[in-house]
Amino acid sequence: MIKKVLALLKKDLLLELRQQHTFYGILLYIAATVYVLHLSLPDSPDANVWNSLFWVIQLFVCVNTVAKSFLQESKGRMLYFYSIASPVEFILAKLLFNIILMLFMSLVSLLLFYVFLDNPVSNMGLFIGIVLLGGTGISLVFTLMSAIAAKAQQNAALIAILGFPVILPQLLLLMRLSKAAFAEVFREGAVLQLAGLVAGLDVLVIMMAVILFPYLWKD
């Protein structure tokens, strides 16, 4: 199983390297968005605004990054995958690929925020950890939504429609959790509780994907 998952993951990575225009397009989108924020904000934003802007941009970056995960797969290619891999192996490979891609985009976004919008973060190590945790969670949700939308006549708009109610609580949790990196005082153990809750949501989404995707696979 692990070998098949890694082989499917390698396939997605090679396709991404061959289709570099898509990858660079997303990077350009991130850079342009952050630069427009830099031009539109006369002064350096305070910590709350900086934090909110960062996570909102991560949401839109993930939609643009993960949306093509299943929508780019043709029916013929999906039939081929159906004959060589199980649905669990296929969805796990997709989840891993999108996690890797989203984590890279999140770190790029953080670097651009640091360059163009200063750095109000007091504990950068903690914030990077929260960014990695949050990027993983957001990519998991939209990967599952992409799989559902791909079966609904390739309608990419369904990804945002289905994903918004699911991602909103997680996004609010991440905004609250990341405030710990801005020197906001939390009661003892609150940071670990919030981080555990976000990690629990990530595990729940993975379990949902493993349980529900085989039914989409058969369709």
Image: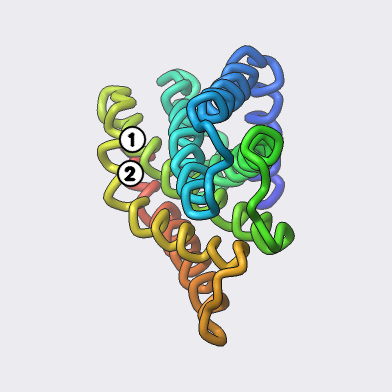
Classify the position of the C terminus by image quarter. Answer: top left
Q: Nearer the viewer, residue 112 or 171?
A: 112
Q: Which residue is mark 2?
A: 163
Residue located farthest toward the top when viewing the structure as drawn: 21
Q: Position of residue 180 (x, y in %)?
A: 58, 68
Q: Position of residue 108 (x, y in %)?
A: 68, 36
Q: Nearer the viewer, residue 217 or 132?
A: 132
- Residue 210, image x, y percentages: 44, 55
User: Image check: 165 left or right of 193?
Assistant: left
Position of 166 relative to 41 (above/below): below
Residue placed farthest to the front in the image?
Answer: 43
- Tell me the distance, in whole angstroms, between the alpha carbons under discs 1 and 2: 6 Å
Q: Say which residue appears at 39% left-offset and 37% top-offset.
A: 147
Tag 1 residue? 159
In the image shown, does 157 or 11 lie closer to the viewer? 157
Query: Mark 2 and mark 1 in contact (Cβ < 8 Å)?
Result: yes
Residue in view at x 58 percent, y 17 percent: 25
Which residue is depicted at the point 26% across and 37% down? Answer: 161
Q: Amino acid at mark 2?
A: Gly
x and y percent of residue 48 in the render?
Answer: 48, 54
Q: Secondary structure at mark 2?
A: helix
Which three-letter amino acid code belongs to the residue tagged 1? Ile
Display coloring: rainbow
Per the image, label 1 sits on a secondary structure element best described as: helix
Mark 2 surroundings within 10 Å by alpha-carbon count, few (fewer than 14), some (14 through 19), many (20 or more): some
Is 17 on the left-hand or right-hand side of 133?
right
Seen from the viewer's position, the closer of residues 96 and 80 is 96
